[in-house]
Image (cartoon, grey):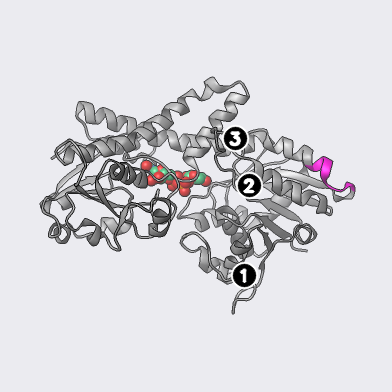
Amino acid sequence: MSLKITVIGTGYLGATHAAAMAELGFEVLGLDVVPEKIAMLERGETPMYEPGLEDLLRRHVAGFEGSSGRLRFTMDWAEVAEFGDVHFVCVNTPQRHGDYAADMSYVDAAVASLAPHLRGPALVVGKSTVPVGSAERLAAYLAEHAPAGADAELAWNPEFLREGFAVQDTLHPDRIVVGVRSERAEKLLREVYATPLAGGTPFVVTDFPTAELVKTAANSFLATKISFINAMAEVCEAGGGDVARLAEAIGYDDRIGKKFLRAGIGFGGGCLPKDIRAFMARAGELGADQALTFLREIDSINMRRRGQMVEMAREALGGGSFLGRRVAVLGATFKPDSDDVRDSPALNVAGQIHLQGGQVTVYDPKGMDNARRVFPTLGYADTASEAVRGADVVLHLTEWREFRELDPAALGELVADRVLLDGRNTLDPELWRRAGWTYRAMGRPNA
Ligand code: UDX
């Protein structure tokens, strides 16, 4: 008998996980408490832009012509409990208002809603990013609140997907990490992930706290790499030096590696910033805050970059006030191939300049609707050229491929002074300079 899977929470993580589980051949039932979300998914649509996800959904959501029909959605907890052998909890853990800790209320509510309906044997698997110790607490809750015969058990299986690569990362993960307390739980999860395991994906079996910590440790390491290279960019700016060449040169050392060493305006999004803050908050609760004080520095290096970009723009305009100056901003999302503007460095820089009196015009290939919602008072343009037309300075703040493919000569016709500031270090300096632009990037010498 093939396992039946439920996915609780159909946001970014849940929608991707549910579709991927159906792709792996399982019958899947997704649950959400927001009817509009379910209605969208049933139409094969997602509230966010994620390459390949809508296609995957349409391949499996029941009701589509030619779909496998293996993926359905509901709002009924009893139906979920009845249906599933393995229940994945995929709700989010946002930053709590008032402090930096993770808000566990959605995870707690999901387990509390499911528990009384469970029928045995049931495995509840947490995928959300949570403070260490949560799995232990939730396992105790399940033991107390699931019906006696349900034989309900908890496991932890963190998710490492990146926005823009969510489908690929879910179907072909670098590794699968499971925190388990029984052979039965391990066996069930090996069955769930049989396809990637057969393809050679490493499977790390561990305890609850380690499984929880792997996720926060991985994100902290990634954030550290980015802030490290941004700190080097600051030193390059002060002492003369080219951070891009420096990153290339240190990256040849396998122990360091080339990835995640691109200097610029830093990291944003719904994960890295909030996860390192929640990690620090949790360490504080555990009396281990000293171990993570370095993350405070990682966070402040990162946040400082945004202000430094604003100052670079001010300097490029001759110093002084932004009042009446026209600033074109290319990019609003926190990274390319996403429409996510949560804690976006690009939008933050655009906003700061706008609040200081600059006439800012933003263009982003996919993030316009979200950006308009978050920052309605900024100027917006429908194309990169339109944003650039008449600008006193152009800021490249999200590294979309579309921006690398721009024609600097053609854009140069639209402005009086050709000044481009590359906040992502992904444009080709020579290409822009040859077309008559003053090209400046963070942490690199001016030519
Ligand atoms: C991250 C983790 O990578 C992923 O494993 C985890 O599951 C969720 O958090 P994501 O938020 O999608 O994923 O973004 P990521 O690709 O990690 O990029 C984060 C930010 O860092 C972006 O704003 C990006 O522009 C920036 N970045 C990335 C740099 O500034 N320099 C780099 O070298 C790499």
User: Badge 2 local density, few (<14 within 10 Å), some, or many (20+)?
Assistant: many
Q: Earlier in the sequence, mark 2 or mark 3?
A: 2
Q: Earlier in the sequence, mark 1 or mark 2?
A: 1
Name which residue lies at 59% across and 29% down.
282
Percent of width and height locating residue 41: 58, 66
> What's the CA distance linking mark 2 and mark 3?
12 Å
**Label drawn at residue 136:** none
Q: Nearer the viewer, mark 1 or mark 3?
A: 1
Tell me if I can see residue 65 in this picture: yes
Give the residue type at disc 1: Val
Give the residue type at disc 3: Leu
User: Badge 3 local density, few (<14 within 10 Å), some, or many (20+)?
Assistant: some
> Which secondary structure lies at badge 3?
helix
Q: Give, as a single range, the part of the protein colored magenta.
A: 142-148
Q: Is mark 1 within 8 Å of ligand 1?
A: no
**Residue beneath label 3, please?**
213
Task: Determine which quarter of the picture holds residue 447.
Answer: top left
Give the residue type at disc 2: Lys
**Label drawn at residue 127:** 2
Tell me if I can see residue 123 in this picture: no
Task: Determine which quarter of the picture holds residue 102.
Answer: top right
Task: Determine which quarter of the picture holds residue 210.
Answer: top right
**Residue beneath label 1, please?**
61
